[in-house]
Amino acid sequence: MTSPPPPSPPSPGRQLARLWASLTPRRIAINLVVATLAAIALNPIFDTPFLSVWGRSIFVGLMLLVAFDIAGHWPSRWLPRWVVQVAAVAITAPVATGIAYLVMVQGDVTSFQRNEGLLWGFLSIAGTGIAVGLTLALGALYRERDAQARSQALAFELERSTLEKQALDAQLRLLHAQIEPHFLFNTLANVQQLVESGSSRAGPVLQSLIAYLRAAMPSLAQRSGTLGNEVRLVRAYLELMRMRMPDRLAFGVSLPPALEALPFPPMALLTLVENAVRHGIDPGEAGGRIEVGARTVAAMAQVEVWVEDTGPGMDEKAVPGTGLSNLRDRLKVAYGGAAELQLADAVPHGLRATIVMPDPEAKLEPK
């Protein structure tokens, strides 16, 4: 396997465009301020007017800024970029100072030998340029590295959040896939009992089952739903179960209109109702009643959705079934620690299963 060819260096035109874009007004203004302060500090040791010292300082400062940026965009395979930039600043300071002085003396190099003041001025401005330039360059490199570290940390955090979301979605799909066959097979087994016994109710029950499945299939494929849709599905299921055992099952469903649009995990409430029919109503010869309801607890900014039956109640030795275990896992994945399934004995007998979840419409009162 051959390694991919190294990326080609950017064209000179593109490098020039990058360089021009990096020379922002803010950076130029800072450079002018620093050059002015350096000229004020050096002016007492010069015999020439302040404007002359100021002009040389500004020229050297701008040259240092351009050299720093060029070195930052210059491709280097042997040295780190920051080393090239620091070296460029250290070299440019005396070169730029020499150019400024050559312009001032009109190219007469021998004037430095005749006038020691020129040589002393050159060394002063060049030394100041090196010291101030390196200080500002190292500071800029540190800030750039810090900004890159923060940007990389944000990118890692975003990637971690994306992966966590994908993992939660996959877990929800897995749990949902475990619930769907569990519910459907139990429902078909109930219908099978009527068909095998030759009951006259088998036909109407099958018709009700077909109508129920037409309403249920879209919910099975959804990853999110509303409490109103879930309650309608539960009502259809209880109607189907009442046709199977008309003398043993009674039920009531109550949902405030304000809660119909509340986001709610599909099949969650149906799992509790199915559990109530299977373990609360079926075992007793006299049957019983199932109540389904929901309410808002404003003081706690929560919504309670419950299923209560008049069956034998909880058995402390019983092991939680697949439906309830999966429901708890789905609530944990969907709401974290903000939602839970509570099981309690009903009065005078029976079981009350309550899903407690946060109310997205609740508004916290200001303190």
Image (cartoon, rainbow, N blue to C red):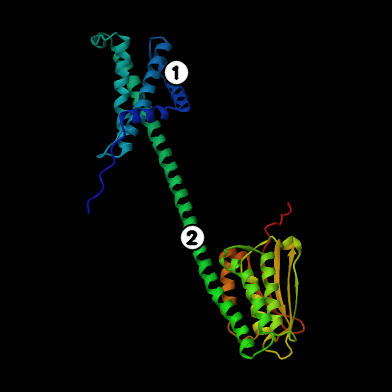
Q: Residue 222 falls in which quadrant of the image? A: bottom right
Q: Is residue 315 above or below residue 261?
A: below
Amino acid type at image mark 2: Gln
Residue appearing at x 64%, y 69% in the figure? 215
Residue 125 falls left or right of residue 347? left
Residue appearing at x 32%, y 37% in the figure? 81
Residue nearer the viewer, 184 or 303: 184
Percent x, y for residue 200? 69, 87
Residue nearer the viewer, 153 or 273: 273
User: In the rendered image, is residue 229 in sight?
Assistant: yes
Amino acid type at image mark 1: Ile
Residue tagged 1:
40
Q: CA distance from mark 1 to mark 2?
A: 61 Å
Q: Residue 134 falls in which quadrant of the image? A: top left
Residue appearing at x 47%, y 24% in the figure? 29
Q: Secondary structure at mark 1?
A: helix
Mark 1–mark 2 contact, CB under 8 Å?
A: no
Q: How many marks?
A: 2
Closer mark to the observer between disc 1 and disc 2? 2
Pointer 1 or 2: first along the chain: 1
Residue nearer the viewer, 249 or 305: 249
User: Where is the N terminus found, in terms of image quarters?
Assistant: bottom left
Percent x, y for residue 87? 29, 32
Q: Secondary structure at mark 2?
A: helix
Residue 28 falls left or right of residue 227? left
Residue appearing at x 29%, y 8% in the figure? 106
Residue tagged 2:
166
* Mark 1 Cα shell of 10 Å, populated few (<14), some (14-19), many (≥20): some
Percent x, y for residue 223? 57, 63
Percent x, y for residue 300? 72, 63
